[in-house]
Amino acid sequence: MITNERQYKITKAALSELVNAIEQFSLSKEAAEIGSSTLAKTQLQAMESERTQLTEQLEEYDALRSGLIDGLLAKSLSELPTTLIKARIVKGWSQRELAEALELKEQQVQRYEAEKYASASFRRLLEVAAALSLEVSESVRLSASGGRSEDLQKADKFDWGKFPLREMYKRNWFEDFAGSMTDAEMNRELLIENFLSRVWRQPLQAFHKKHERIDTRTDEYSLVAWECRVLRLADRIKIEGSYNRERLTGNWLSGLVRLSADQNGPQLARTYLAKMGIALVLEPHLPQTYLDGAMLMSVDKRPVIGMTLRYDRLDNFWFVLLHELAHLILHSESKKYVRFFDDLEVEGDRVEAEADEFAGEALLPEDIWTKSVTRYVRSAQSVNQLAKRLGIGPWVIAGRIRNESEDYTILRELVGTGEARKQFPEVHFGQ
């Protein structure tokens, strides 16, 4: 959402550049450069999707500041922060003018709106509403089927009792704490707040600007704890290069995929990514998270790919890795989401479908796969021959066959079972 004139100008300029890029985009030229027509189409689709989002943001801001809107409605408490921002724009006030009315610094209002009032108390929200001449009714209704994420975003503060303290203690995540489990229970709030604050200035930020493809049984508090752990581990990884989205070319991606032919490919991939300024972190999932991977951004805006290796197979490693890279390449610059969480056994939306298609195409181009007899013969000999010809790991092809046929009893010997986790001996997978 655009909240001020500066963002409006930046978004308008970004849209203009994007429109020019789309007009100059040549499918045939891009396909020839990266060796895949499907991948080139996916990139164009992502650009067009981004154009639609930017256009909608500009149109919304234009409508708000035009003064033609005379009524705003927040259907729930979770919508109140966004309604407050819209009300300020409709009123014709700048962030500075609202700050003056509240006797705050302009930077504080900017911070509030940037995080959609995540750190503001309910009392502060009411003060903002009063300054904007908004009426807030005190209507409360209990719901027996309220959504899990929505409940958390409505919360005025964390329920510290819901964090998986025992599991976090067992995994030695409280590294500076030398007490017993009983001591940890007695200091639960202090321990967890300190654990989170090393990543987020305001812990409630952990529940915003994220895209989830997860099981409905997933525990949000466990997911937040896992994310925080991954980001803290990412800070310890030595990164040789600085991240630049423009360097993630088709040739670079092909170089990454070729590493799959090596038995130690996952290790090599971590080094390969680090040279591009991307941290790869392995951390087993917590109970009740059902997670395969995530694409995150560190505090200093460095990409971090987190993987759980809950399925210890090489075919799984490579698909999850490319899926998260797809989010980085296709979706991370939209500003709508900066973090992506994926359980790849769950059906995804359009964003996830794009990432699935990108990953599949990068690993095994569709124009090659559709013409290959291996797709139908499904023998170990045929898989190995095609893998050798393409310079990729046979597990990539075997995994594709098993997934397409939905028959996971075939080609078991070729998917690299038990070969992924052991390449990261520093990680304790609980076995």
Image (cartoon, rainbow, N blue to C red):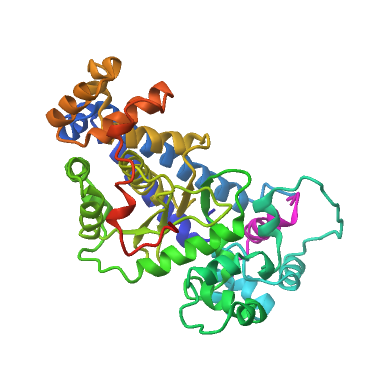
Q: Give the range drawn in magenta.
A: 72-95
Q: Does the magenta stretch include residue 387?
A: no
- The quadrant holding residue 29 is top left
Q: Is residue 252 left or right of residue 322?
A: left
Question: In front: 67, or 360?
Answer: 360
Compared to 395, does 109 lie above or below? Answer: below
Question: In front: 45, or 199?
Answer: 199
Q: In this view, does 256 lie to the left or right of 187?
A: left
Compared to 182, does 403 lie above or below? Answer: above
Compared to 346, does 288 lie above or below? Answer: below
Whether residue 1 is visible: yes
- On the image, the x and y values in percent for residue 382 come to 20, 21
- The quadrant holding residue 132 is bottom right
- On the image, the x and y values in percent for residue 57 come to 52, 47
| Main secondary-structure element of the magenta-colored stretch | helix
Q: Is residue 78 magenta?
A: yes
- On the image, the x and y values in percent for residue 307 come to 39, 53
Q: Is residue 305 left or right of residue 395?
A: right
- On the image, the x and y values in percent for residue 210 come to 52, 53
- The quadrant holding residue 379 is top left
- Residue sticking out furthest to the front: 431
Residue at horizontal 24 percent and vertical 63 percent from the top: 242
Question: In front: 210, or 132?
Answer: 210
Residue at horizontal 29 percent and vertical 27 percent from the top: 38
